[in-house]
Image: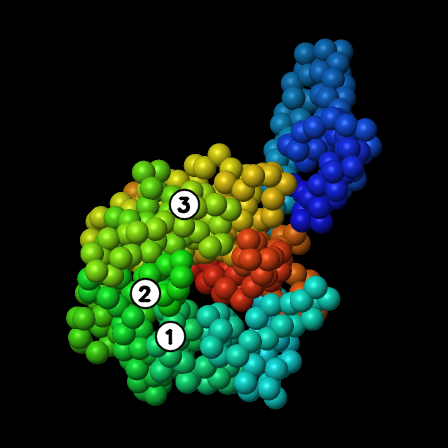
Amino acid sequence: MLNQRQVKAVLYAKEKGRLRTHKFCRCCRRQGGEKKITVRCGDKLEFLPQIFGYVIIFLYVWRLLTLKKDDMKKMFILSMGVIASLLMGCGSGEESMEALIKDRLERSAQHYLRMAESLKDQPDKLPRTINAEGMLVTSNSGWWCSGFVPGTLWYLYEYTKDEVFLTYARDYTARIEKEQFNKGTHDLGFMLYCSFGNGYRLTGAKPYSEILLTGAESLISRFNPTVGCIKSWNSNARWQFPVIIDNMMNLEFLFWASRESGDPKYRDICISHADVTTANHFRPDYSTYHVVSYDTITGQPDRKNTAQGFSDASAWARGQAWGFYGYVVMYRETKDVKYLEQAKHIAAFLLHHPNLPADKIPYWDFNAPEIPNELRDASAGAIMASALIELSGYVDATLAKEYMGVAETQIRTLSSPEYFAESGTNGNFILKHSVGSLPGKSEVDVPLTYADYYYIEALLRYQAVKK
């Protein structure tokens, strides 16, 4: 597999007409193309171990043919023992999932401990990403991602039971308290439920519940009963009542509000929003549009577009992941089989798509024009992995095995050096190579807070399932 830097080298060489492939190189064979000058891809030449193996087999067979019958029997028994040992050795070469998850959680905790310490005296700032020089970029509490770092700190406190993480989780959560009154965004689930929601789940602190219920009221102020959905962005010249697929992720917050308050109105809004989204966002193949705008008089869709994908008709990877995760939550909260079927159909689209790479980390858009020379999106892979692990608990054994197998591959890939950052690098974020908005040229091939959040969630979910 080419990493992001190697992809850029290949693209540059293609532009200059100076690319040829290594005959025996796995990644070059996948890239294809035959031109003049080799780009160093860094992959291993796979013919050497193959030739070595053939030589050993030839010598072994030749030796057997020259032995007497009794000696041949002894050598055969000895050989079987050697082969069994080799097979066992090969099997133990891959790090077990249990060991991998433990190691990455501990290393992630160190990343976030350094990150939290770096802003401990700047209470109006939250980590966002890094700039071109690798320096930390921050946001205020109004940024739609403000809840993810506090949420990740809560997850790491849950894993470590370390009071230091509890202190930092409380500190960074408090930084976004005022957003409970924010009626100008649909992202209050991300902002408040990932932070205060996890805090309330782990501590039972009553003030957290009160803040969350106030935030739920703010969120449902954006619901339009004629449309049947929560408005995502505010009206503008292009869209009258835009609803983006990302909005499915905020419904979990409202389901909690109904349970906590005893008021069914929040739950009813969730069901309405999900049903209208099923009807109007999804194509026959179960891919989803990014943005559907509605006429507020008729309640019918008037435009179907994208803001962050390659084209209006394409399958923007993170949007597909948001929708997938959202319908898994819908089934968990309602036990209505129609949501389970929707989640399974979306999973089938994602997992069986011809443009999903073997390592299961999607390109930023499934229909991006230069695949396989397009950027990957680690955040989409992390969201998918977390949702697949949960969905595996709601389906038959065959599908559960498939879902867990893909999630395991995604976790292994994200945990590899290609994506998992070394200590003290990457602005102390955990994962590299996410794509915020490539069309908007914003946060492209950088770490993003939600990639880290759903990666840690996937690790904890996998660990819980396997216990």
The spot of residue 115 in percent (x, y) is 62, 75
Q: Secondary structure at mark 3?
A: helix
Residue located at (77% from left, 27% from top): 35
> At label 1, which amino acid type do we have?
Gly
x and y percentages locating residue 162 in the rendered image: 52, 79
Residue type pointed to by label 2: Lys
**Residue topped by disc 3:** 403
Q: Is residue 86 visible?
A: yes
Distance CA(mark 3)–CA(mark 1): 37 Å
Camera-side mark, 3 or 1: 1
Q: Are marks 3 and 2 in contact (CB under 8 Å)?
A: no
Badge 2 is on which residue? 231
Point 61% across, 88% down: residue: 121
In the image, residue 382 sits, relative to residue 89, either above or below, namely below
Number of the front mark, 3 or 2:
2
Image location of residue 61, percent across then percent down: 71, 16
| Residue 409 visible at all | no
- Residue 11 appears in which quarter of the rendering? top right
Quadrant where the image shows the N terminus: top right
Residue at (38% x, 71% y) in the render? 185
Vertical order, 224 against 116 (above or below): above
Tell me: residue 419, above or below residue 35: below
